Image (cartoon, helix red, strand yellow):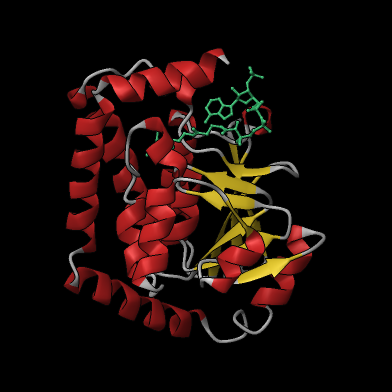
Amino acid sequence: MAYTIEKRDEIIIFEINRPAIHNAINGEVVEGFQRLVQNVKTDNSIKLAVITGAGEKTFCSGGDLSVFHMLKTEKEAYAMLSETAQVLYEVASLDIPTIALLNGTAVGGGCEIATLCDFRLVKKEAKCGFIQGKLGIISGWGGGAYLFEKGMRHDHALQMLTEAVPYTSDYLHSIGWATEVYEGDKYSALAKFSEKMIVPHASVLKAYKKQVIQKWENTQLYERIMKEVSTCSILWEQDAHHEAVDAFLKR
Ligand SMILES: CC[C@@H](C(=O)O)C(=O)SCCNC(=O)CCNC(=O)[C@H](O)C(C)(C)COP(=O)(O)OP(=O)(O)OC[C@H]1O[C@@H](n2cnc3c(N)ncnc32)[C@H](O)[C@@H]1OP(=O)(O)O
């Protein structure tokens, strides 16, 4: 299975389980995110949702290029990107706080998934970045829109998107992208981070998350995400993108 969903006490944990290809996202993982949303909606005892990756090296390497390189046109790209962005928006706007537990590197769409979460716990050795620019596209799942929502300094956010390189965990902490940097076991780091947050009743956590979602609705975050998807789809069709993906797959 490309993912696992596990409930540990009041925390639901979604693990992307494709370590051989750095936890790249395919259709099955997207379906898994849909299941995660359903599970949270139907279980009122869940207080926190965690997304992590299997293995020690990588949180997520973004879209599975071995599958997505078959999408050539703007229309084909839009169908995939918009469907994934829609599901990921549902994950972002779960009615409980979300945590990206970064067990390793996050690049491309992996960095978008981490950014849409409310908190990012980043392993010391991990490097993270919006490398899409190197592939001739922009973030296609709404990552730019999420990044500009997260209260980071505008220049740091824009630099992160336009430089298109991975950064160290310490740098990401210094600019406010990483909530915390941890060393050692990821679940120990999660337990330490969540020990106080897990104490209040679920309705308290939900009330605060509602405020976050209300703000996103006021700033039309969903509409901005979908505009980003459209722009990415236009760039996707261009030769520069296909040539960069071919070069990666043939290297
Ligand atoms: C499509 C959505 C779009 C968005 O909207 O944002 C994106 O996500 S675009 C970004 C797509 N992702 C990438 O371009 C990242 C590609 N991967 C890497 O840069 C590197 O693999 C890594 C994650 C930094 C790890 O490097 P390294 O430790 O040197 O491992 P390898 O590169 O040798 O990889 C081993 C193995 O895994 C395959 N792989 C890695 N990432 C992907 C991927 N995203 N899709 C498909 N396959 C991937 C890689 O090809 C190797 O396979 P083999 O050569 O068969 O061993």
Nearer to the camera, 37 or 208: 208
Q: Position of residue 51 (x, y in %)?
A: 56, 54
Q: Is residue 153 left or right of residue 29?
A: left
Nearer to the camera, 109 or 27: 109
Q: Is residue 132 above or below residue 246?
A: below
Evaluate whether residue 42 shows in this view.
no
Q: Is residue 43 left or right of residue 77?
A: right
Nearer to the camera, 123 or 5: 123
Q: Position of residue 141 (x, y in %)?
A: 34, 45
Evaluate whether residue 19 shows in this view.
yes
Quarter of the rendered structure image containing ligand 1 = top right
Q: Residue at x 73, y 60 (%)?
A: 124
Q: Residue at x 44, y 82 (%)?
A: 203
Q: Residue at x 58, y 16 (%)?
A: 251
Indicate the quadrant containing the N terminus: top left, top right, bottom left or bottom right: top right
Residue furthest out toward the right: 184
Q: Position of residue 234 (x, y in %)?
A: 19, 32
Q: Residue at x 57, y 47 (%)?
A: 106
Nearer to the camera, 237 or 210: 237
Q: Is residue 193 above or below residue 41?
A: below
Residue furthest out toward the top: 250
Q: Position of residue 29 (x, y in %)?
A: 49, 36
Q: How many marks?
A: 0
Q: Is residue 193 above or below residue 242?
A: below
